[in-house]
Image (spheres, coloured by chain):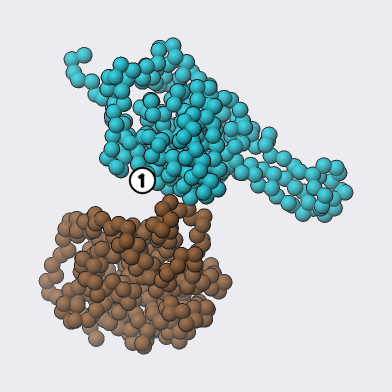
Chain colours: A brown, B cyan
Amino acid sequence: MSFIAPKSRRSIDQVGVLERAGRFTTRSIKSKSKVEGLKMALSMIDLTTLEGKDTPGKVRQLCYKARHLHDSYAGLPTVAAVCVYPSMVKTAKKSLGSSGVKVASVSTAFPSGQSAQNLKIEETKYAVGEGADEVDMVISRGALLSGDLNYVFDEIASVKAACGSSRLKVILETGELDNFDQVRLASDISMEAGADFIKTSTGKISPAANMPVTLIMLEAIRDYFLKTGKMIGMKPAGGIRTAKQSLHYLVMVKETLGEDWLSNEWFRFGASSLANDILMQLVKQEQGNYQSMNYFTID
Amino acid sequence: MSRLEVAKTYKLYIGGKFPRTESGRTYQLKGPKGENIANLCQASRKDFRESVIPARKAQASWASKTAYNRSQVLYRLAEMLEGRKAQFVDELKQSGFSLLEAKKEVEDSLECLVHYAGWADKYQQIFSSVNPVASSHFNFSVCEPSGVVVATAPLSNPLHGLCFLVSVCLAGGNSLIVLASEKTPHVAISFAEVVHTSDVPGGLVNILTGFEDELVEHFASHMDVNAVIYARNNSKVSQKMELASADNMKRYFNWSDLEGKIKYSPYFIRDLQEVKTTWHPIERISSSGSGY
């Protein structure tokens, strides 16, 4: 397997991307469509806890939150998935039961990816064996930046093989890539190598997800779809905290990829504090007054 | 003067910045003879919402500063105001204050700031207590700040009343969103410049200009506001505020008797505090003597 980079790649138009990304924030989405949009965003969230201090108790609590976002508000969806370290997959799987909420596990020496390839494959097999429905891997940014594209490609392909039927999300960690061209390149490599999803960031590095970078990745997905007819999912992660931001992202997805991508099958938010802000906005829409964090669960 | 005077654009003061109102609405401020003094921002519900966010953020770290430090920052406010007395006297005169009245208003404001700066590290000793209980506990009560406070400033003492609200809130570790006097809002926005340059963290004090009628209900219904103060004497509006705050059991204070007569008392600081009582187990009740 190898990745053949096109001889001449057209460089990303940076000014154009920034301008275009800025436009998505100017759409007016009010009342009913706002509520629908917010509920959709809720259903796309991957609730995440990726800390060294995670305990089974913390994970169980997060899983409870995933199923019961705000019980006093009728008709809320659950989030899409809970994202944890491989050692917590079993706990998460057990507490989510048959709720339909997926368990995603990070893998491949998350967040740095600095480990041997065979260990990364073993780790992925372990996570899948524990019951992970989805695997979030990180690419080897060092190899990518030093031009060893085939290494990156092969690694993704072999992790994909280790995933079996679990879906593979490939984290580019755009905060560590130097420019937009590399984001596009990394997206193309990942999709060619078999990624089911491409994801911006680990959430451990600043800057995390932002709209311009996500736009570039969405355009890569679009081009790949036009070329091969295969749909790839997108997951911006980190830095998306407010309900308003989530609506901006949904607008961007709709206007770049179309409505087919507007489901948690193809689009996710990697975020943990976003859920509460969306809940506050939904309750505000319902009751008419602005809400306080004090009346929502902490995790 | 051989050139046109450079007039100041009076904007709002939110989160340590001077933004225009989100609504784009303005109103003309008239002097006593009907002359135009300035265009003021007519703050909207959204402007208010935007100011609750930084107020909430700033409050926790303000409350965790030492009482002594809070006192110093309040005193610093007085220092900055002292240096700009002339500007405030001028602006008050524009609104119909005589020179003497204007000077007195500024002097009173300074005194108010210094007075409450002094209380910042003392009220806790007066209002906290050790409580006698009939079990093996050391029982004590301390004051903790209410949190985010929203107030309508008195109309007749545009600067003194504002300084009063700022100092009782800040001395007690609260953050404040205040609707400036509608008669002399430009003075309040100039005071925001004083706040801005005097070690008060951005977002701790937010100043809006606009009309109480359209805003008080939103002040009281916002769930992330802990206390509301009505310091004017329009009973119709105060009722509206009280009703809306009863809906969510928010603390509501009617300080309408401050209109025209600002008072000096640590009990104003006490109003904006919650009491936390701790039952600390001790080994034997008898060992600590009576009263414990």
The quarter of the picture where residue A5 lies is bottom left
Q: Position of residue B57 (x, y in %)?
A: 46, 47
Please state which amino acid type lies under the numbered disc 1.
Lys
Secondary structure under the numbered disc 1 in the rendered image: helix
Q: Position of residue B6 (x, y in %)?
A: 24, 24
Residue at the extreme right of the image, as rendered: B286
Q: Is B110 on the left-hand or right-hand side of A215? A: right
A278 or A57: nearer the viewer: A278
Q: Position of residue A165 (x, y in %)?
A: 36, 87
Residue at point 43%, 77% (across, down): A101
Residue B139 at least partly seen: yes
Residue at the extreme front of the image, as rendered: B236
Residue, disc 1: B46
Residue at point 50%, 25% (across, down): B259
B115 or B161: nearer the viewer: B161
Q: Which chain's residue wears label 1?
A: B
User: Where B157 falls versus B235 (above or below)?
Assistant: above
Q: Position of residue B174 (x, y in %)?
A: 53, 40
Residue at point 47%, 15% (across, down): B104
User: Where B259 falls versus B97 (above or below)?
Assistant: below
**Quadrant position of the N terminus of chain A in the picture:** bottom left
Residue at point 47%, 73% (across, down): A67
Q: Residues within 10 Å of mark 1 (few under 14, many from 20)?
A: few
